[in-house]
Amino acid sequence: MATSEQITARPVMTDQDASAVLRAAEARARETGARMVIAVVDGAGDLKAFVRMDGAPRGSIEWTIDKAITAASFGMPTHVLTDGVQSSPPVMASMASLPHITLTPGGYPLMLSETLVGAVAAGGGTTPDQDQVVAEAGVAALGSR
Amino acid sequence: MATSEQITARPVMTDQDASAVLRAAEARARETGARMVIAVVDGAGDLKAFVRMDGAPRGSIEWTIDKAITAASFGMPTHVLTDGVQSSPPVMASMASLPHITLTPGGYPLMLSETLVGAVAAGGGTTPDQDQVVAEAGVAALGSR
Amino acid sequence: MATSEQITARPVMTDQDASAVLRAAEARARETGARMVIAVVDGAGDLKAFVRMDGAPRGSIEWTIDKAITAASFGMPTHVLTDGVQSSPPVMASMASLPHITLTPGGYPLMLSETLVGAVAAGGGTTPDQDQVVAEAGVAALGSR
Amino acid sequence: MATSEQITARPVMTDQDASAVLRAAEARARETGARMVIAVVDGAGDLKAFVRMDGAPRGSIEWTIDKAITAASFGMPTHVLTDGVQSSPPVMASMASLPHITLTPGGYPLMLSETLVGAVAAGGGTTPDQDQVVAEAGVAALGSR
């Protein structure tokens, strides 16, 4: 039998963490006057917390969850992933057609002790920049835990 | 031009309402010691608010969202819908295989002024009864608005 | 900033663990003369290791991976999950129609320090019992780590 | 009745072959320090053997399996297929959106006696070149059988 010392462990994001990330992003969205969808997933891309603010387009629901899944699946912000592939049209087209993978800005990995523990994404902003500002407020909330 | 008096309107559930429903259900789950998934959708079955408590099985994510979608889609609690169809195995099997429709207890419509405005569902409890108790706490939170 | 003491952590199954589970199950299958598919997934149901022995039916590929996903998704052996739902035809039909959920024997959760870290499944045996014997050999290999 | 001399046959890749290909590619990945996903499929594109090394991004699971399926489906390395279609954006976009077809480097057909018997692919490398080097080590392992 393995002793606890031998067992490899990794940090996890609790539901309290996920809630703090969600609230921080939502507060930032309200400051900007935007009506947003905000999603938090765990390191495997499974939904942990979600809110759709009044007036946010329903077309942003799946899209925003997919941004979070994409950031968790590749361990990098979605705009960085996009920058890395857009020089190659075949790679870009292939990635964009993978289920739940989206090459749009606004999804960010969440890290604890240099380990991927989840991702947060925002969508529905009137500009991609707005999505990023709101999601980044969520990232900052976990960092200050 | 229609004056504001002439425009037909229906009540809607705000994001504040959805948040209150979610928090009440989550508080009830914590009282029972259960680790649950809780989902709130609007009247069209589109996700409005969601939380997955630590330890809730990931198999309950889609299942619980589907319970809420089912309650919103037919305007009745999922256990009532199930009672109505289980005397006919072909009807039951056909309904169960519709995308996002599930014949399992724990999903409830949310009403304002006798109008369907959404649904709440709970999943991951150790018994179907536990799912129902938690979701009913969410229903009560909207009723007392 | 959080100190490492404050961070919640959980044990994980390494690729060496997954390989040991796979090899033990495959060895057991060869002893029985069966031609099997064996799959190991992590705690989120994502594929970690897989082998299809010569002569194993291709229809068992997705089926066996789904058995492992099901065991990881609900944290229990698939035959136990099945026993729990078969008294209710509507629940049974609803679960069976969820994507990647299967109510067939042969999937088992993998635990380390009482924490779900993955699942192993076997398929393609000539009897459900054979699937279970082979998968259980995989479970035993992790326990003795 | 046909005698054994009269029966038309084609070479096949055994599970031992597939295992040798997988191990050679995995060993090459460890030499380079990369955390990779490696997949081996048969000539029909059905999964035969698979490993996900610790730290490999989960976004590479389906992608890598798809690289192997693509190489088996067209009987050529994925980078050669990509070179052939990228001069026509409509052809490229149409191919990239076919289920399980991906126009990204790192998938190679496996041949025995000039016959297609399967494919191997690697993914998750920090550069496409890394994916190719690792998959090529798998190809070489079969060639030396």
Image (cartoon, coloured by chain):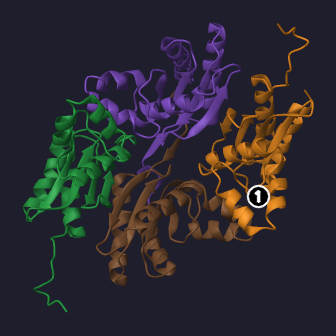
Chain colours: A brown, B green, C purple, D orange
Q: Which residue is mark 1?
A: D127
Residue C128 appears in view: yes
Q: In the rendered view, does A46 fall on the left or right side of C138?
A: left
Q: What amino acid does circle 1 point to?
A: Thr
Q: Quadrant of the C terminus of chain A?
A: bottom left
Please state which of residues C111 and D114 is positioned toward the viewer in this rendering.
Answer: D114
- Estimate the x, y position of residue A101 in percent, counting from the top left: 56, 59
Quadrant position of residue C49: top right
- Estimate the x, y position of residue C13 in percent, counting from the top left: 55, 35
Residue at 44%, 82% in the rendered image: A126
**How many callouts does the rendering have?**
1
Q: In the rendered view, does D46 fall on the left or right side of B13?
A: right
Quadrant position of residue B57: top left
- Estimate the x, y position of residue A32 in percent, counting from the top left: 37, 83
Q: In the rendered view, does D19 fall on the left or right side of D98?
A: right
Please state which of residues B85 and A7 is positioned toward the viewer in this rendering.
Answer: B85
Residue at 37%, 46% in the rendered image: B61
Looking at the image, the residue that sits furthest to the bottom is B1
- Estimate the x, y position of residue C138 in percent, counting from the top left: 56, 21
Looking at the image, the residue that sits furthest to the front is D1
Q: In the rendered view, does A124 fall on the left or right side of D21?
A: left
